[in-house]
Image (tube, rainbow, N blue to C red):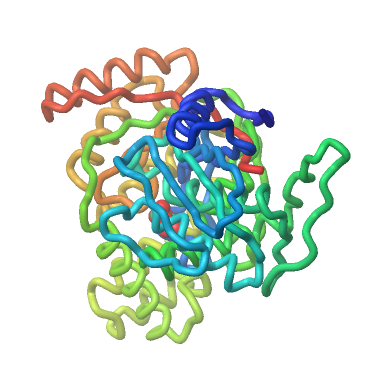
Amino acid sequence: MPTVNHSTAGVTEVQTLFKKHFGYTPAHLVGAPGRLEVLGNHTDYNDGLVMSVAVDKYIFIASAPRTDGRVELVSSAFPGAEKFWITEFQPNPAARWADYVKGVLAQLRRRGVNFSGFNAAIHGTIPMGAGMSSSAALEVATALTVRKLYPYSLTETGSTLPPKRSERGELPPLPLPERMHFARLCRAAENEFVGVQCGLLDQISSLYGKAWHILNIDCRYLTVEHVPVIGEAIIVCETGVKHALVGGEYNELRRNCESAASKLGAKSLRSVELSHLRANRARLTPREYECAYHVVGEIARVVAAERALRADDHRQFGQFMFQSHESSRDFLKNSCKELDLLVDLARKHPGCLGARLTGGGFGGATINLVAYHQAESFMQSVAQVYEKHTGHKISPMVCQVVDGAE
Ligand code: GLA
């Protein structure tokens, strides 16, 4: 069995699922990590700046090729199998989870990638609906699974000659510049097939992650820098609230940001200065103004926070995280009372340097930067008081920062 260079939790499960369902041993195994947005809420689709980490929670796919042009998928999280021909990618309302796979396959086809059928088992350790991007990880894992089964290389506009396998039959790791083409392909799958108009944050994070480093992503120039973050624990607290309409509300935020930019004569909010925004407030609807105010301020915060991080000033960095949450809550309005409660509880703990909602919002989870030696006491006390207030039991978890998928 090929090896994977990351945490093994989930690996046995996916292999067992494959064997149980298909009756033989899989040929390939791919793992793509989830991500946490550290700073920069809803900045990515505004050509802005955003910081994130890839974390030790994965979507795994175990696979093997087929000769009959059929794809058969099975998932540990959903009943039944999804089967289709490689010439027909239709969304199936009864198996939404498979849309992410089909969306990627459709994009690969569009770029001229030749592939045939396969069997695949999917198992994830990323909590679903927590805002840790299980969907992007599934997209990335799908694209990399097809690369293993039917090698190809992506270019800016399509595909080209496949990479050569080594004498042992292994493919070289995905080159860094090519990862951006993979990220864009996976994002296109989500935009066009699934219908969520997300930016590139999640897919880039899953592909460019680096152990012990925060990614500093520039979504206009599509560059990624790695800034070390050592010495603090990253803790996720799930609210337990999953917002059913997240797709629709997300797209609406995006529409407001884009119409604000266009009324201000800018290609995107990345090009808008706060003074210009303030001076032109009357040209925008109140909602456009609020959304733009958040985004413009948030991009500036990422710039300032990067300086703090490079100077190892984690306390200052954490302050920017709190400010980011307040801005999301008050202007973007994508928080909810459970997220606000978690951030308030975090702020009261002496070990906490910063806390904020992470990802799309409207539920999901918070990310907390906590001094290592206080991590246990932080998790216990936040969980205890949260339960007292809401009746919900939660299990905060420490996340390790890991390398991206290959
Ligand atoms: C979701 C989207 C990302 C990004 C975040 C908010 O995770 O998928 O593209 O917009 O929300 O920052």
Counting from the top left corner in percent of width and height, residue 153 is at 73, 60
Q: Is residue 339 above or below residue 94?
A: above
Occupied quadrant, residue 223:
bottom right
Q: Residue at x 39, y 58 (%)?
A: 99
- Left or right: where 403 falls relative to 140: right
Q: Is residue 29 above or below residue 395?
A: below
Q: Is residue 133 visible?
A: no
- Left or right: where 222 falls relative to 253: right
- Left or right: where 99 falls relative to 165: left
Q: Which residue is outermost to the right? A: 167
Q: Residue at x 35, y 13 (%)?
A: 377
Counting from the top left corner in percent of width and height, residue 136 is at 47, 51
Q: Which residue is outermost to the front? A: 68
Q: Is residue 282 above or below residue 177?
A: below
Q: Is residue 139 above or below residue 184?
A: above
Counting from the top left corner in percent of width and height, residue 338 is at 20, 39
Please state, as top left, top right, bottom left or bottom right, where the C terminus lies in the image: top right
Please state, as top left, top right, bottom left or bottom right, where the N terminus lies in the image: top right
Quadrant of the rendered image holding ligand 1: bottom left
Q: Residue at x 47, y 62 (%)?
A: 85
Counting from the top left corner in percent of width and height, residue 265 is at 45, 86
Q: Residue at x 31, y 41 (%)?
A: 78
